[in-house]
Amino acid sequence: MTSPTDPTPDAVPDPGSPDALPEDPALAAAVLEIEAHVAQDGWDQPARLYALVDTATLVAQEPALAAAMAIDGPGDDGSFTPIEQDGLPPGQVLEDALQTIAWPDSVTGCAAVIERLVLPPEVDDEIPDDPTAAELFAREHPERQEVRMVAGVTRAGASYCALRLRAHDDEQSVVNGTELVPGLLDLLHATLHDPLHDLAHDTQPHPHENP
């Protein structure tokens, strides 16, 4: 059972595997901050979308917004502040929503959170073609893994991901890396760079919840 936002087969390793070094430490810090924040609310959550804005720029240009989010200083040089966006409309999946989003220039990056059922690659041939039957097959399969994925990207091209297994639901078991969910990363990059998105709606960052 695969979708564009499924992790790669080797992206769900045993907990404790070495983490990939981030190409952008500020992005990695933001992704891990989001992951820890979302984890506090437990499992079976809807998808979430975040704008990533430069903290110093936010404090300088939007002091009232920064104060409302309890940000009292510019933070570390180059750090990002995640700003959660409104939830998706009922029935809309994250993959479809991302294809309609274009971020304004004030947004330096973006991140998404999504939960997925993942099956081992060797059962791919057993998965029914019918989507409803495939979902039921995945939910009942004894080797299923429930995974929460947090993926973030920047306009500069950096990416970072954090994956948490429901079976190993603790901070020490979170798996980090730069390319763990390539399909989701591609969709997020497109919202920042794809000119076709200029014809879609322009998403303005606004506070919904501060991780």
Image (cartoon, rainbow, N blue to C red):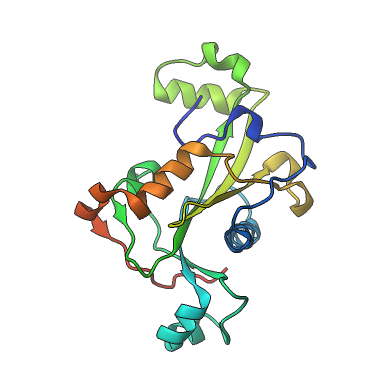
Vertical position of residue 32 compared to residue 78: above or below: above
Rendering coords of residue 10 (x, y %): 65, 30
Q: Across the whole image, how many numbered discs are drawn on residues?
A: 0
Residue 66 located left or right of residue 118? left
From the viewer's side, name the closer residue of 178 and 210. 178
Q: Quadrant of residue 143?
A: top right
The residue that appears at 34% across and 52% down in the rendered structure is: 193
Vertical position of residue 193 compared to residue 1: above or below: below
The residue that appears at 63% across and 62% down in the rendered structure is: 29
The residue that appears at 46% across and 79% down in the rendered structure is: 57
Residue 61 located left or right of residue 81? left
From the viewer's side, name the closer residue of 109 and 151. 109
Asked whether residue 120 appears in the rendered view, the answer is yes
Residue at the extreme left of the image, as rendered: 199
The residue that appears at 56% across and 35% down in the rendered structure is: 7
Vertical position of residue 81 compared to residue 98: above or below: below
Rendering coords of residue 131 (x, y %): 41, 24
